[in-house]
Every structure is written in structure tokens, then in C-alpha cells.
Image (cartoon, rainbow, N blue to C red):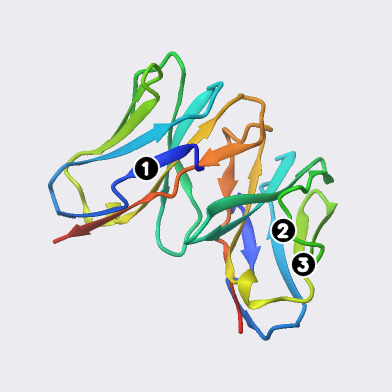
């Protein structure tokens, strides 16, 4: 398995534009987590899915953020409209357990909103 | 207030030298503590995970210790290599089945030749 795959690796967009981040989890992992990492706040959990179903999205900062997992091998995180304060590195992680003891992170998407 | 505090914030060491990173936590209850290594431009990678009953765990040149009584952990890097340059993040879990983790801000280690 190639591990957790995220795309794009880098995204630069103008304020107000829609941004879609993509994630392919490790096959067989039932849990998928979206994180955001900034210098100020470190790693923050945004939302997690179990068997493609969103379980807890309380970490999503605003209604501008949404996430979907249409099937076991694909998830998206969308920001619309994007704002400069959304600039961060967004990570997707998949795990075979809810406690994330066996979690693997993707390489992240560095988002810059200008 | 962050429940996981790491120190120092950053450090620079010469190749071949040892170093120790600290992690203090106030998370309660406590289930396990993990150390992650994050290379620049990469996602975090797990180095060690320790439960309440474990005092020490090694992964190659990385040795983690845990004192659950004082709520302190350390990560010792032996004979550092240039590839050890990274951010090291301490993560605490209150419950083995709880998806919510408490993350430290990380310690940035720079190894110089």
C-alpha cells in the first residue's frame, strides 16, 4: 500500500475561491481523520469518519468548511469561500482503530489563501 | 490552556551528540502517550506509544520514557544524525478508544554536521 495519499500537495488560491482537498486512505482502514496544522495552534482535529460516515465534525471551524466521504477510498475537504486565515497545512490520516494508535498520516496539503 | 507542554521549543545539536526532549501533560484520565516525528513537508510518523504501565520504549536510536505519576515523558535521541532534523510531537490520549487526542506544540530539532 502506498500509504495515505493527499492531493494537491500545494494549493494557492485567492480569497473567496472554493478549495477542495482530496484524500485516499489506506485500504482496509475504517477511520479517516482530517487535521489542520498551523504554527499558532499546532494540530487540530477537524472531522472524522467511521465507515464513510461523519461522526464528529465539531472541530470544523465554520460553515465554510465541509467534508465528504462518498466511499471507502476517497474523502474531500472543501472550503468555500476561502479566507486568508484558512492558510495552513491540512492532513488526512487513516486508522484501523478509533483511538488512532495505528494511524498513518498523509503528506499534507499546504494551502495558501491570498 | 494546552494540556500537553513540550520543551524546549527548539534546539540545535551537532551530529553524533545526544539530546533529550521533554513533555509534561495534565491530561486526565490517561491511557497512552505517543511521540511522533514530523519531517519538514511531511505528515507525522509514530515513533513510540506507551501505556500507563510502560516506563520506557525504544525505537532504534529513539528512547522514550514515561513517568505517569509525575505526568512527564522524555524522548532521548542517541548519536544524532542529520536525518533526525525534524519536529517531534508529544501526543496524549485519555482513553484508548477515544479519537480525541491532545497534541503538544512540538520541539524542532536541528542536527548540524
SS class of the residue under badge 3? strand
Tell which subunit mark 1 falls on: B
In the picture of the structure, the residue carrying the numbered disc 3 is: A78
Q: How far is mark 3 from mark 2, CA to CA?
A: 12 Å
Quarter of the image with the C terminus of chain B is: bottom left
Tell which subunit mark 3 falls on: A
In the picture of the structure, the residue carrying the numbered disc 1 is: B6
Tell which subunit mark 2 falls on: A
Relative to A20, residue B24 above or below:
above
Query: x, y percentage for residue A37?
Result: 55, 58
Relative to A75, residue A29 above or below:
above
Closer to the camera, A9 or B54? Answer: B54
CA neighbours of label 1 inside 10 A, class few (<14), some (14 to 19), many (20+): many
- Is residue B59 among the parts visible in the rendering? no
Query: x, y percentage for residue B82?
Result: 23, 57
Residue A91 badge: none
In the picture of the structure, the residue carrying the numbered disc 2 is: A61
Amino acid at each position: 500500500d502506498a500509504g495515505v495519499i493527499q492531493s494537491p500537495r500545494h494549493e494557492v488560491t485567492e480569497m473567496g475561491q472554493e478549495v477542495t482537498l482530496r484524500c485516499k486512505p489506506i485500504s482496509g482502514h475504517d477511520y479517516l481523520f482530517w487535521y489542520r496544522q498551523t504554527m499558532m495552534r499546532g494540530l487540530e482535529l477537524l472531522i472524522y469518519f467511521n465507515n464513510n460516515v461523519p461522526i464528529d465534525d465539531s472541530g470544523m471551524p465554520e460553515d465554510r468548511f465541509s467534508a465528504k466521504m462518498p466511499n471507502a477510498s476517497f474523502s474531500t475537504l472543501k472550503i468555500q469561500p476561502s479566507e486568508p486565515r484558512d492558510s495552513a497545512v491540512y492532513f488526512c490520516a487513516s486508522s484501523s482503530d478509533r483511538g488512532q494508535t495505528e494511524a498513518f498520516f498523509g503528506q499534507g496539503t499546504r494551502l495558501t489563501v491570498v | 490552556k494546552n494540556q500537553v507542554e513540550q520543551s524546549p521549543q527548539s534546539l540545535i545539536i551537532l551530529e553524533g551528540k545526544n539530546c533529550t526532549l521533554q513533555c509534561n501533560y495534565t491530561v486526565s484520565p490517561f491511557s497512552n502517550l505517543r511521540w511522533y516525528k514530523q519531517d519538514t513537508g511531511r505528515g507525522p510518523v509514530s515513533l513510540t506509544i506507551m501505556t500507563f504501565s510502560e516506563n520506557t520504549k525504544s525505537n532504534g536510536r529513539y528512547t522514550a520514557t514515561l513517568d505517569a505519576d509525575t505526568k512527564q515523558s522524555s524522548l532521548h535521541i542517541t548519536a544524532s544524525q542529520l536525518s533526525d532534523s525534524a519536529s517531534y510531537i508529544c501526543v496524549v490520549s485519555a482513553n484508548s478508544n477515544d479519537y480525541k487526542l491532545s497534541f503538544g506544540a512540538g520541539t524542532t530539532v536541528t542536527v548540524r554536521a
